[in-house]
Image (cartoon, rainbow, N blue to C red):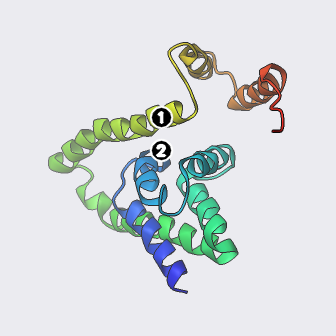
Amino acid sequence: MRNLTKLFFIFAKIGLFTLGGGYAMLPLMEKELVGTYLSKEDFLDVTAVAQSAPGIMAINVAILTGYRLQGGPGAAFAACGAALPSFIIILGVALFFRQFAENAVVVRLFKGIRPAVVALIMVPVFTLAESAGVTIKTVWVSLAVALAVWLLGVSPVYVVLVAILCGLLFTKKEQPR
């Protein structure tokens, strides 16, 4: 029970002190989990699976990490820890937002937070790119995919399917040693 409570509070702390959603949470998750609970490779694997699974990425990372560490109960405690702070904050905002929505200070506050959230999202993008082995020579693939999805409206489903196919066709078979 002690480990489950600890898992809950790790993800509750991450959820409480991070603005910007799942991608903005990744650096804090990495700091809290890698080395103590997960290896860097395990964290990258958990993040990749969480991104490709439906649902909220931060919750998916919490579920996968909790399950890996403590099974089903770990998944439940980690997911609750990740979701509860956001739920409470959003509930509080919803209760009082109408009263302050037109307040000039509140409007400026939200406008000031936007650039910080963008920066918080960019940090894990660079970290994941580095961990995935993206280099100056291969960054064009990421840029082409991002532009295709953004400007041409290509479905991410097709991007994932093509990436799987390319992975199967163009990577060398690893020989057992």
* Quarter of the N terminus within the rendering: bottom right
User: Which residue position holds label 2?
Assistant: 23
Q: Quadrant of residue 110?
A: top left
Amino acid type, callout 1: Val
User: Which residue position holds label 1?
Assistant: 125
* Quarter of the C terminus within the rendering: top right
Q: Quadrant of residue 111?
A: top left
Q: Secondary structure at mark 2?
A: helix
Q: Is residue 54 left or right of residue 166?
A: left
Residue drawn at x 56%, y 67% is 79
Q: Nearer the viewer, residue 66 or 85?
A: 66
Q: Are marks 2 and 1 in contact (CB under 8 Å)?
A: yes
Residue 170 position within the rendered picture, expressed as x and y whole percent measured from the top left? 79, 19
Q: Nearer the viewer, residue 2 or 175?
A: 175
Q: Is residue 165 left or right of residue 72?
A: right
Disc 2 or 1, which lies upstream in sequence?
2
Q: Is residue 72 left or right of residue 80?
A: right
Residue 170: which disc? Answer: none
Q: Residue furthest left?
A: 105
Amino acid type, callout 2: Tyr
